[in-house]
C-alpha cells in the first residue's frame, strides 16, 4: 500500500513556512553507443516501461501525480483575472494592418540617428539595428539585393562546414534573390512598405514558410504534412516587406534544450563553436547572434526562445499565451507554446512583435485578451514610470545556479537598474516549483504525444532521433489521470503567481542556471540525454509556459569564459509592454559590455 499525501488548498498555504528545495534530477547522462542501446531497450515491451517507471519513481513524479490529493479543480489552459492597464503605453490596433502597427511601434522608440553609427567606425561593437538597415536602404548606401548576396555567400559557406553545423536546413538562394529584388525595386521607387521592408528574417523549422517544408528538423514530417501557405504570423511579416532567408535549424520537434540535431548537424554557438546554442530554437538564435539576420522567429513551449537567446547573447520575447496566432505551426494545438521573435536588440523585438501579433479567433473568445500595447519609450516620463515599478525576486531560487557568475552578473544588472531608476526590489516566495516543473512536462509531453502519436504508430517514430524517441517513451507513460492532476497543479501555481503580482509588477530571475554547455563530440552523431544540464537550462522558465505569462530574456554580460548571460523578466498576464520597458532599460545599462561573437558577419557594411 502506498501512503497517500494531501495538499492544503493553495489559499491556505502559509508562504512564510515555504522552504526552497534545490531540484535534483536522477537520470543518466548518455551519448554514443550506450545512448543508442539504452533507447532500443527503452522501446522493448515490459522492459522499457519498467525502466521509465523506475526513473519516475526516483524523481517522485508518480508520488505527486498518482498518490497525492490535489484539492483544486483542473485548469486546462491559462485563465486570468482582469488586469489593470499598463502605464505609459501605446495601444496597437490588433485588427489593423501589420505595417500600421509597425509604424506605431516605430513612434514608441527613443530618438536615434543611424547616420552617426554608419559614419563612425570607431564605436564599440554593437549589432546593426533595423533602423540602421532602413537608413542604409533609403540613402542608397546599400540595397536589399546587395545584402542578399552577402547573406547567400555566408549561408553557402556555412553549408560546407565539416562536421555539418547548419544555421538553415531549408534554403533557396533564388527565392531570397527574388524577394530582395522586389524590395530593392520598392526602395528605388520610393515606396517601401514599412521599416521592415528589406529586413532579413529566418523562420524556425516548425513554423510554415511557403514553399519550404516544415519538418521540425526531422527527416520525415514533410511526408505526412504539406505546407500550402505561410503561417499566420509569417504572412503578417511578409506583408511588411520582410525577406525570409529560409528555415532555421532546431532541436528535433522542439524536444530538447541544447539544440543538438544529428539529422542535419548541430548549430554551434557563435561565441564558442565548441558549445551549444541552447534550444530548441538553436538556428534562429545563432543566425541573429552571428549578425546574418536582424531577427528570427522561434517557438517557446519550454523556454525554447529564451534559452538560446540567453546562451547566444541576444534578446528573446515569449509573449503571453494567446497573444499571437499559432495557426500554421507544428505546435498549434497546445496550451503552453507561442511563436516569438528573437533579435539583437529590444527595439527590434518591438518592431517584429508589432507586425506579427494578433490573437486567434478562438483565443479571443476563451481568453478575452486586452488590446496589445507597447511601451512609449520616446516619452519623457519613461524614467518616472520605471521608478514606480516593483520587481519581485525569490533570492534562494535566483541564486540556485551552476556557477555564481550567472547570478552575480544578473544581480549586477539589477543593482544598475535600481541605482539608475529607483526601482523597488521586493523579496517574494514562490511555492511548489518542483510541482510546477512536473505539471509542465506532463502538459507539454501529452500535447506533443497527441499531435505526433498517429504518425509514430504508423512507423515514422523510428526515423526520429534517439533524443526524441526517449522523450516519446516518457510521454507515453503519462495517463489521463496524470494529465488531470497536472492541470490541477496548474491552477494552484496560477493562484500563487496572481497573489505575487498583487505585490510586484514583474518577477526577475537569471534566464538559465548555466551558460552554454560544451558539446560532447560523441553526441554529434546520435544525440544525447543529459537531464542535469536540462534542469539548469530550464530552471527559471516554466512559469512563462505553464501559466502563459509574458517573459523576455535580455543579455547582461558574460562569464569568465566570455559566454553570454541573460536576465529574465516575467510579467503579469498580458503585460508585454512592462517587460519590454524594463528590458530596454537593462539593455541600455549593460550595453557597454557587448562583445563581438567569434563567428560574426558584418552583413550591412561587409568589411
Image (cartoon, rainbow, N blue to C red):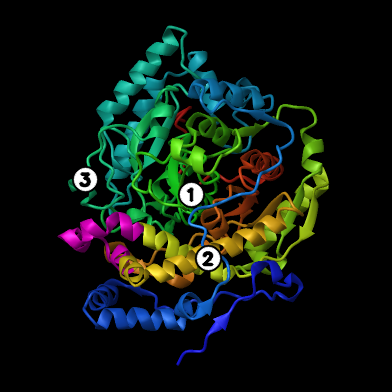
In this rendering, does residue 402 appear at all?
A: no
Which mark, by number, is residue 488?
A: 2
SS for dot 2? helix
Is 173 or 195 nearer to us in this picture?
Answer: 195
The local secondary structure at tag 1 comes to loop
Q: Is residue 461 magenta?
A: yes
Position of residue 195 relative to residue 408, above or below, is above
Number of the label disc, if any, that sits on residue 222: 3
Residue 305 - label: 1
Residue 539 image position (x, y, % from top left): 55, 64
Q: Quadrant of the N terminus?
A: bottom left
Gap between marks 3 and 1 measured at Cα: 23 Å
- Residue at the spot 71% in from the left edge and 66% down from the top edge: 429
Residue 583 is situated, as x and y percent measured from the top left of the image, at 65, 43
The question of residue 79 being in magenta is answered with: no
Tell me if mark 1 has few (under 14), some (14-19) or many (20+) residues whose alpha carbon lies within 10 angstroms of its own: many
User: Residue 449 has which mark?
Assistant: none
Q: Disc 2 and disc 1: Cα gap in Å?
A: 26 Å
Labelled pair 3, 2 in contact (Cβ < 8 Å): no
In the image, 386: left or right of 196? right
Disc 3 or 2, which lies upstream in sequence? 3
The disc, 2 or 1, on the residue closer to the chain's N-terminal end is: 1
Q: In front: 332, or 520? A: 332
Residue stretch in magenta: 448-470
Q: Nearer the viewer, mark 3 or mark 1?
A: 3
Q: Are marks 3 and 1 in contact (CB under 8 Å)?
A: no
Q: Residue at x 63, y 53 (%)?
A: 567
Amino acid at each position: 500500500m502506498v501512503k497517500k499525501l494531501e495538499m492544503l488548498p493553495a489559499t491556505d498555504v502559509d508562504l512564510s513556512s515555504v522552504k526552497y528545495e534545490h531540484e535534483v534530477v536522477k537520470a543518466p547522462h548518455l551519448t554514443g553507443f550506450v545512448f543508442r542501446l539504452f533507447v532500443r531497450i527503452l522501446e522493448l515491451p515490459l522492459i522499457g516501461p519498467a525502466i521509465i517507471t523506475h526513473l519516475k519513481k526516483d524523481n517522485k513524479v508518480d508520488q505527486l501525480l498518482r498518490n497525492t490529493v490535489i484539492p483544486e479543480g483542473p485548469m486546462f489552459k491559462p485563465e486570468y483575472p482582469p488586469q489593470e492597464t499598463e502605464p505609459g503605453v501605446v495601444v496597437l490596433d490588433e485588427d489593423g494592418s501589420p505595417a500600421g502597427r509597425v509604424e506605431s511601434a516605430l513612434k514608441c522608440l527613443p530618438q536615434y540617428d543611424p547616420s552617426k553609427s554608419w559614419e563612425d567606425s570607431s564605436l564599440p561593437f554593437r549589432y546593426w539595428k533595423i533602423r540602421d538597415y532602413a537608413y542604409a536602404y533609403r540613402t542608397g548606401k546599400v540595397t536589399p539585393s546587395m545584402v542578399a548576396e552577402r547573406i547567400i555567400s555566408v549561408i553557402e559557406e556555412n553549408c560546407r562546414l565539416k562536421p555539418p553545423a547548419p544555421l538553415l536546413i531549408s534554403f533557396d538562394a533564388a527565392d531570397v534573390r527574388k524577394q530582395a529584388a522586389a524590395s530593392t525595386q520598392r526602395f528605388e521607387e520610393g515606396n517601401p512598405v514599412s521599416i521592415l521592408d528589406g529586413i532579413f528574417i529566418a523562420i524556425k523549422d516548425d513554423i510554415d514558410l511557403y514553399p519550404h517544408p516544415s519538418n521540425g528538423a526531422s527527416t520525415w514530417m514533410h511526408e505526412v504534412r504539406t505546407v500550402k501557405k505561410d503561417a499566420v504570423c509569417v504572412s503578417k511579416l511578409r506583408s511588411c516587406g520582410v525577406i525570409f532567408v529560409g528555415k532555421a535549424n532546431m532541436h528535433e520537434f522542439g524536444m530538447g534544450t541544447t539544440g543538438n540535431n544529428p539529422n542535419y548537424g548541430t548549430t554551434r554557438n557563435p561565441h564558442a563553436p565548441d558549445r551549444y546554442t541552447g534550444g530548441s530554437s538553436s538556428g534562429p538564435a545563432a543566425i541573429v547572434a552571428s549578425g546574418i539576420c536582424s531577427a528570427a522567429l522561434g517557438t517557446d513551449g519550454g523556454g525554447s526562445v529564451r534559452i538560446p537567446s540567453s546562451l547566444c547573447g541576444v534578446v528573446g520575447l515569449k509573449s503571453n499565451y494567446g497573444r499571437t496566432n499559432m495557426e500554421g505551426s507544428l505546435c498549434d494545438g497546445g496550451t503552453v507554446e507561442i511563436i516569438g521573435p528573437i533579435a539583437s536588440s529590444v527595439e527590434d523585438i518591438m518592431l517584429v512583435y508589432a507586425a506579427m501579433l494578433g490573437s486567434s479567433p478562438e483565443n479571443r473568445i476563451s481568453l478575452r485578451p486586452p488590446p496589445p500595447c507597447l511601451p512609449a519609450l520616446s516619452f519623457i516620463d519613461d524614467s518616472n514610470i520605471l521608478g514606480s515599478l516593483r520587481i519581485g525576486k525569490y533570492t534562494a531560487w535566483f541564486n540556485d545556479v551552476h556557477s555564481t557568475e550567472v547570478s552575480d552578473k544578473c544581480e549586477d544588472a539589477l543593482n544598475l537598474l535600481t541605482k539608475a531608476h529607483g526601482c523597488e526590489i521586493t523579496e517574494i516566495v514562490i511555492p511548489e516549483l518542483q510541482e510546477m516543473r512536473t505539471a509542465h512536462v506532463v502538459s507539454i509531453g501529452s500535447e506533443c504525444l497527441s499531435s505526433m502519436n498517429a504518425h509514430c504508430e504508423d512507423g515514422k517514430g523510428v526515423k526520429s532521433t534517439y533524443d526524441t524517441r526517449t522523450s516519446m517513451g516518457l510521454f507515453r507513460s503519462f495517463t489521463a489521470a496524470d494529465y488531470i492532476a497536472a492541470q490541477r497543479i496548474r491552477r494552484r501555481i496560477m493562484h500563487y503567481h496572481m497573489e505575487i503580482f498583487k505585490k510586484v509588477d514583474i518577477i526577475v530571475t537569471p534566464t538559465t542556471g548555466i551558460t552554454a554547455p560544451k558539446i560532447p563530440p560523441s553526441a554529434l552523431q546520435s544525440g544525447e540525454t543529459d537531464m542535469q544540464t536540462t534542469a539548469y537550462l530550464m530552471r527559471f522558465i516554466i512559469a512563462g509556459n505553464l501559466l502563459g505569462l509574458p517573459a523576455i530574456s535580455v543579455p547582461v554580460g558574460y562569464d569568465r569564459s566570455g559566454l553570454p548571460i541573460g536576465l529574465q523578466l516575467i510579467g503579469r498576464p498580458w503585460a508585454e509592454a512592462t517587460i519590454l520597458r524594463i528590458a530596454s532599460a537593462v539593455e541600455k545599462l549593460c550595453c557597454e559590455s557587448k562583445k563581438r561573437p567569434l563567428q560574426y558577419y558584418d552583413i550591412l557594411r561587409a568589411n
